[in-house]
Image: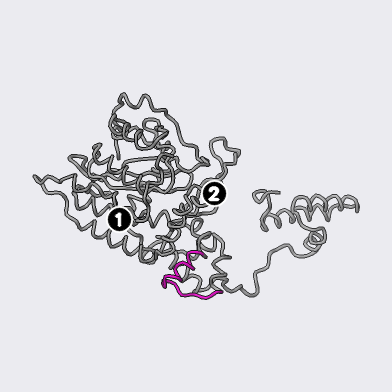
Amino acid sequence: MSPEERMTIDERRKYLHKMRIRYWQAQRRKERSQLLDEMEAVTELHRKSLLRLIHGELARKPRRKQRGKTYGSDVKAAVGVIAHSLDYPCAERLQPNLVWMAKHLIQHGELHTTPEVLHKLGQISVSSLWRLLPRAGPERPRLAQRKARPGAPNQFRAAVPVRRIDWDEPQPGHFEADLVHHCGPSSEGQYVHSLQLVDVTTGWSECVALLGRSFLVLEDGFQHIFQRLPFPLVELHPDNGSEFFNNFLLKFLKDKVKGLKLSRSRPFQKNDNRFVEENNFSLVRAYVGYQRLDTVAQTNLLNQLYDLLWLYHNFFQPVMRLKEKIPTSDPLHNKRIYDPAQTPLDRLCAHGVLDGQLQSQLLALREATNPFQLRRSIELLTTQLFNLPRAKDGVTENVYDTLGLWQAPLLSTAKEPAYHDR
């Protein structure tokens, strides 16, 4: 019997209340035996337990002595430090990663605890973890705050097939792409955009800030991403924006990544790019908000912030991926089962797509990084970004001052882009 079909204690007692009347009204021994067989099958209780309940008191008695708390203040304090370091993910994402993150923070001197607490962190359930996590208010400060119009059809879209990347795509390298507008309440003039790519299989994210959306800055943004991307790019799946579908960018992508597969979502169907659309909030809006950004200084500072977020999210933020869909009685809805939460880096290592030396470099980079200090740096850059002034009327911002940042990747030992000619 599945967990959904199994009776709760209250349902079982209610059922036995009715069956007890039939049991005592039965005159023959054989009839009572048949009733006991039926109760065994329905309740999954042993025959002797059923007889004790029927002959005794079915009402549930209150506990004489309440149990003490399994997870005390020491466990709650450790969970609070770990959750704060990871910007308070949900319990389902946090629970499989408590132990290794606790050891990681101990190594960097941000957490001081005992082996007993580490053992309890490995035993705690998702529901218990939900009770320990602060829900809102001053105990749970977030890192920062919490529309792009479809372009007109053009001749270059017609040659690109319309499809959705499968939710259970097994091979890393299939990226959804999108451009987030930082125009504030008005879309007039030139302003900053965030170009984001998200791998469907692993959740690996790449993000870069661009001043405007001309081919000049998009080419530079993709160069930045390609220089840092540690595994091959197989497919690029943007929406229908004209910034992606033009002769210049398509030729650049074709020449830069040999054998690249291009696809696009259906017009006005944002759910075809569901993974990157979800990350547009959690990885961009949650930190940058909805205010207008339109200067060189803001673009360059935002790129510094995205460099830290690249490390923070890909190396430390556990993500859940859909594992199975189970049909239900409702034909419009399926029951969804998710796999244990893992960081995108751990998922990449499990898929075996990383070069051995590069994988060692990435793991060493995570080992040497203090996520608590990284979070502080992100908060500091976010505050600085909000304090920068907007563009002044009549003053032209030089786009060329935002180019060339990709020439200094975070992995200084990387000699060639990982995607090259694969």
Of residue 2 and residue 359, the one placed in the foreground of this image is 359
Q: Position of residue 235 (x, y in %)?
A: 43, 37
Q: Is residue 237 magenta?
A: no
* Residue that protrudes farthest toward the left in the picture: 394
Report whether residue 302 is seen: yes
Q: Position of residue 292 (x, y in %)?
A: 22, 48
State whether residue 1 is above or below residue 239. Answer: below
At horizontal 52% and vertical 73% (from top left) the residue drawn is 72
User: How far apart are the two marked residues, 1 and 2, measured between alpha carbons?
Assistant: 30 Å
Q: For the residue labelled by badge 2, is the local secondary structure a helix, a strand or a loop?
A: strand
Residue 305 got which mark? Answer: 1
Report whether residue 146 is seen: no
Q: Is residue 390 left or right of residue 126?
A: left
* Rendered image quadrant of residue 241: top left
Residue 121 got which mark? Answer: none
Stretch of the chain drawn in magenta = 100-115
Q: Is residue 210 left or right of residue 257?
A: left
Q: What is the crowding at mark 1: few (fewer than 14 residues within 10 Å), some, or many (at least 20)?
A: many
* Rendered image quadrant of residue 232: top left
Check disc 2 and report the residue beneath it. 338
State whether residue 250 is above or below residue 401. Answer: above
Model colouring: one colour
At horizontal 53% and vertical 36% (from top left) the residue drawn is 332
| Mark toward the viewer: 1 or 2 | 1
Q: Position of residue 286 (x, y in %)?
A: 34, 53
Q: Is residue 106 magenta?
A: yes
